[in-house]
Image: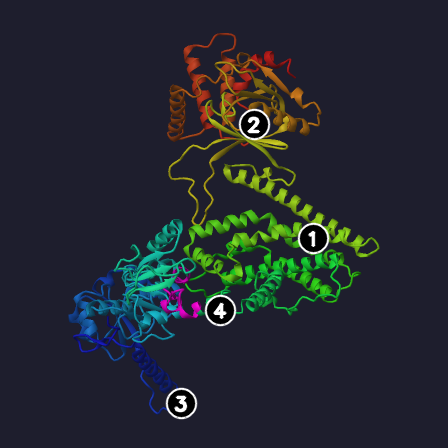
Amino acid sequence: MADNSVLTSTTGRTSLADSSIFDSKVTEISKENVFIGSASYVEEEMPQIETRMILVQEAGKQEELIKALKEIKVPFVKMESLEELESLDSPEFENVFIVMDFEDSVFNELHKTDYRIIGPPVILNCAQKGEPLPFSCRPLYCTSMMNLVLCFTGFRKKEELVRLVTLVHHMGGVIRKDFNSKVTHLVANCTQGEKFRIAVSLGTPIMKSEWIYKAWERRNEQDFFASVDDFRNEFKVPPFQDCILSFLGFSDEEKTNMEEMTKMQGGNCFPVGDERCTHLVVEENVVKELPFEPSKKLYVVKQEWFWGSIQMDARAGETMYLYEKANTPELKKSVSLLSLNTPNSNRKRRRLKETLAQLSRETDMSPFPPQTPKSCTKSSKNSTPVPLKQSARWQVAKELYQTESNYVNILATIIQLFQVPLEEEGQRGGPILAPEEIKTIFGSIPDIFDVHTKIKDDLEDLIVNWDESKSIGDIFLKYSKDLVKTYPPFVNFFEMSKETIIKCEKQKPRFHAFLKINQAKPECGRQSLVELLIRPVQRLPSVALLLNDLKKHTAEDNPDKSTLEKAIGSLKEVMTHINEDKRKTEAQKQIFDVVYEVDGCPANLLSSHRSLVQRVETISLGEHPCDRGEQVTLFLFNDCLEIARKRHKVIGTFRSPPGHTRPPASLKHIHLMPLSQIKKVLDIRETEDCHNAFALLVRPPTERANVLLSFQMTSEELPKENWLKMLCRHVANTICKADAENLIYSADPESFEVNTKDMDSTLSRASRAIKKTSKKVTRAFSFSKTPKRALRRALMTSQSSVEGRSPSSNDKHVMSRLSSTSSLAGIPSPSLVSLPSFFERRSHTLSRSTTHLI
């Protein structure tokens, strides 16, 4: 492998050299010209040279290009052939040639004579942005790589490298031979070499050569920049490119997961011991000795190298993560020093006993190393004082302080080890998580940390200056309002926080690697982030138990006795408030879920006093509220009933917008009905032709007759009897009646023409499908829609004209056509205020069957 070198083209000029030298000379010359031109003591005034654009061949036929030149007010002429070149040469003008194709013979001839050449996109961009033409001694076709500084490594073929450098220059980029801090992108053909390592350490994006080729393909696009993240990320060199990995010491599940991620990150996997492997990733806590002697070309690394490479989106340096054998001489020496089978074993046993006692004291204080975020650094005493007489009350107070100290350390670990690194700017590879995801995961953890740090400091002062009369209850009473303020926002949304972590870990490999690295650190005690975040949910009940224990060991004449009772009561109020707030939050979340699931759901469904009681899946048995056989979902709320049908599939519509993760609504709103409109609940008796059916006798305020809505339950989890009792109970609560059972009426299916016999038959499903298809076809070929009011008026006129005689076949045909057109042209309403005339035609039949029900 050879790094870039100076390549000389056939024209005798340097094609690939350090552009910094060339560009600096151009800058110095331009500065000198400005200085000379502005000097007041120059005897002769420099002649003014005007820039003139020359449209070469096809460029002169582009109307858009000519319009842009007029907008930027630059003179231009057209040139059809190279024979006109001499006639266009003038000392009054600096000619700049606009060429459509940078690969034809005309371009090559102009380039040999050192004329300034630009492409049409340069002119169009300047006209669009109102900017002057950029100065470039090299041919400049577009500005999609303007202000980018590139460096190359690992390219062996001279022709390929010259081609890439030429394209970069044509797009306005600059080339550097040596890698330095000014380089914005490294174009790598391999993952070895010094330049690659420096780019990784500096966080410089490492790109494939395809990035340049694809950018050149888009050279004619307006407002396109090759450095845009969405485009650039497609061509970044993955962390494990040119790597062949094998894994040792991992469980089958972990190994499968790591192999999948290796392939996602551009690498390959072979079995352990394969000579083609470049890296052996070892679980250092499990593997004590390698099963074979590794070759010098094989990197034997810890798993932290694997996850670290994924997190930083670049291959990490192996030397920092090399695996060391567990049976080293130093370890053997340390093990022998702990052996008890040596002379003077009594002395060593005594020394071991003292060591264990010391360890137990340290463990009692905190299993977590003290971790305090930089923003919350506070002084703390390092030792726990021991009073002369250790009473039972002191022992409980000490335990309360120790657990509070441990809890604060856990919160500090969450903030310092997880939240702060995720929020840091300038992360290698870009942000690991979006700001809203970080906010969802951690919520009010910093606020909880601040409150408990104050509580811990007060407890520490109390323990240091211990006295039996000191009040511990006052400390918790002092911060009760802060606890009420900080805990509900976190506890209420803990499940959402947990779900966000799980979702991001599955969808974002860098976040998964970030968790793997940090959760393996001793500060976490081998606990996952979810396990650490559950501590705030458990803390307040634990404190209440300790305060109860403290009250038991407090004398009756101690002033802290009553204070502790108040503190315990205050904590219970906090927990009650949290539970109540959580219940309300969950109820509101359920309503929002209904709104998102039901397309066209009325906004007034969202109410602070409303809660979802039950969801029931049914099939419509009548023609209303929708067609017979339609799948209908009933959402029972404490004061209303939302009726929605299953949404029909429509190709090419209802697509989620970009970045929208919520699935499209699966239901279509039919009617939001107050429970007060339900007059009777009919329990349809079970027969051979009718199974699991019920009906609602509804009286909308604008209708003269009762309306019957019949359904068949398809939910097997909820018995029909329980569902009807639940529905009647909430109807009774809404209309302020105590006798909810009187709302249920048992009825025969024949009385109300209800049956479920053909619901599951193939013929029935086929007929319903044909009916829906015919309606769609009728709607598709309907070129005009008559208002429903006009159709009703026409129908009434037709009925009045035939009153007193039986309608003829022609009349029947007209009426059926009008009725069909009315049903097709009618606009669906979100309410049942105007019910179909179907119920009016059956009003006499229903009135006979339901008169005794009301």
**Which amino acid type corresponds to the residue marked 1 in the rendered image?**
Leu
Label 2's element?
Answer: loop
**Which amino acid type corresponds to the residue marked 2 in the rendered image?**
Leu
How far apart, in angstroms, are the residues tagged by discs 1 and 2? 58 Å
Count of numbered labels shown in the rendering: 4
Q: Is residue 366 left or right of residue 252?
A: right
Q: Are marks 4 and 2 in contact (CB under 8 Å)?
A: no
Give the image location of residue 297, x and y in percent: 28, 66
In percent of the image, x 67 and y 26: which residue is there?
A: 732
Q: Relative to 53, does residue 252 appear above or below in the rendering?
A: above
Say which label, 4 or 3, has the lower sequence index.
3
| Residue bearing the label numbered 2 | 832
| Residue bearing the label numbered 4 | 337
How far apart, in angstroms, are the residues tagged by discs 1 and 4? 42 Å
| Residue bearing the label numbered 3 | 40
The one nearer the camera, 773 or 244, is: 244
Q: Is residue 588 left or right of residue 251?
A: right
Q: Which residues are magenta?
A: 304-332
Q: Are marks 4 and 3 in contact (CB under 8 Å)?
A: no
Say which label, 3 or 1, has the lower sequence index.
3
Q: Is residue 450 left or right of residue 769?
A: right
Label 3's element?
Answer: loop
**Which amino acid type corresponds to the residue marked 3 in the rendered image?**
Ser
Residue 50, magenta (yes or no): no
The quarter in which the C terminus is drawn is top right
Q: Which mark is residue 733?
A: none
| Residue bearing the label numbered 1 | 546
Look at discs 1 and 4 and give the one toward the viewer: 4
